[in-house]
Image (cartoon, helix red, strand yellow):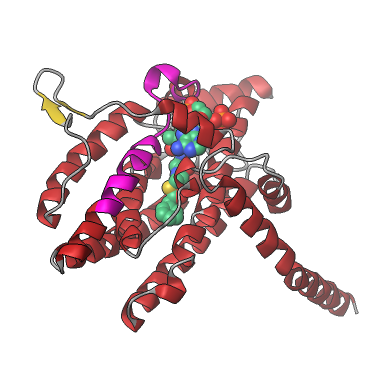
Amino acid sequence: EEAAGQANFDRVIAEDSRIEPKDWMPAAYRKTLLRQISQHAHSEIIGMQPEANWISRAPSLKRKAILMAKVQDEAGHGLYLYSAAETLGQNRDEMTDALIAGKARYSSIFNYPALTWADMGAIGWLVDGAAICNQVPLCRASYGPYGRAMVRICKEESFHQRQGFEILLELSNGTPAQKQMAQDAVNRWYAPALMMFGPPDDDSPNSKQSMAWNIKRFSNDELRSRFVGMMVEQVRVLGLTLPDDQVRFNEDSKKWEHGPLDWEEFHEVLAGRGPCNSQRLERRRQAHDDGAWVREAAAAYAAKQSMKTKE
Ligand code: FAQ
């Protein structure tokens, strides 16, 4: 049976078609999908924090409503992704436990502080921009539930990026101090956003296999380079600059190049020693504890309903 399953799996991958939850799949394929999808889900959930911290300080009612909607979307993305991960056989409680125990990864980017209102613009423009660039190809991921979740997520991320761009545009066209605040936020978020794409290709242990399985479609460096090209165009419209004087289009390779990134810093953040790692995890633990009564009430209600159907 395993041989038949493997043959079917190989055929589906070769045809660039889709694997569904009930199909046989190699254990390593299941494991890497669980790894990537659960990390992605955790990123959405932890990623709510830098922006949620600014909801009460949004400069107008309109901005507050927009920011609340965005943060709520991120919670929704986390839920679609946990559901996709559950189809691979791990339940959400286990994933949550791993996150709050500090044993699970989530994106490095969310361990940086959001210092001013302009950071809401820079996060939307750069962080959501990088997320879209990375996630549009994932809409074609070979695992059905992941690819389908990505389609909806990418549509919402596009709105998020536009709202970030618009915050920066308004600040950039405001007073000199507002323009400076926008530039400062772009300066601080640029390099961490480039690191969202993951380590350089020659230091990316998972890429080759994930590409062979049609999970990833492009390498980390390829996507990072494309992202830089997109930002170069958009930053001009903003009237701001990228804090990188080495950005250039290489005519030979036909790729955008950027200045060196501090991979030492990236590894420190991944090891839990970034500027906000402990604060983010502490906040998540607190939220989980505060939500205990909701889980208990839901479980009690479900038990009562199942008694009713038995009668
Ligand atoms: N941060 O071999 P690779 C969002 C880890 S967007 C932390 O290259 P892979 C939207 C990697 O897990 C952010 N860890 O790995 C939003 C692996 O560790 P492991 C989330 C990182 O999987 C916006 C090791 O390094 N997006 O949330 C990072 O082939 C605004 C070796 O790396 C996704 O998760 C990093 N930046 O490629 C929300 C997208 N990079 O597991 C709120 C889906 C690498 O072996 C507000 N994921 N690592 O222990 C992916 O596309 C891939 O997993 C990559 C990494 C590209 C992130």
Q: Nearer the viewer, residue 99 or 61?
A: 61
- Quarter occupied by the C terminus: bottom right
Residue 210 appears in the picture as rendered: no
Report x, y in % for residue 221.
32, 27
Q: Residue at x 22, y 53 (%)?
A: 183
Q: Nearer the viewer, residue 23 or 81?
A: 81
Inspect the magenta stretch and tell me whether residue 302 lies in it: no
Residue 76 appears in the picture as rendered: yes
The answer to whether residue 216 is above or below residue 77 is: above
Inspect the magenta stretch and tell me whether residue 206 lies in it: yes
Report x, y in % for residue 26.
61, 26
Furthest residue in direction front, as rendered:
177
Furthest residue in direction bottom, as rendered:
61
Horizontal side, residue 223 vs residue 249: left or right: right
Instruction: Kindly indicate the quadrant of the structure image that contains residue 156.
Output: bottom left
Residue stretch rendered in magenta on the structure: 184-207
Q: Residue at x 44, y 62 (%)?
A: 51
Q: Nearer the viewer, residue 272 or 18?
A: 272
Tally the marks. Answer: 0
Q: Main secondary structure of the magenta part?
A: helix
- Quarter occupied by the N terminus: top right
The answer to whether residue 198 is above or below residue 39 is: above
Q: Residue at x 18, y 61 (%)?
A: 179
Report x, y in % for residue 192.
38, 40
Report x, y in % for residue 43.
52, 49
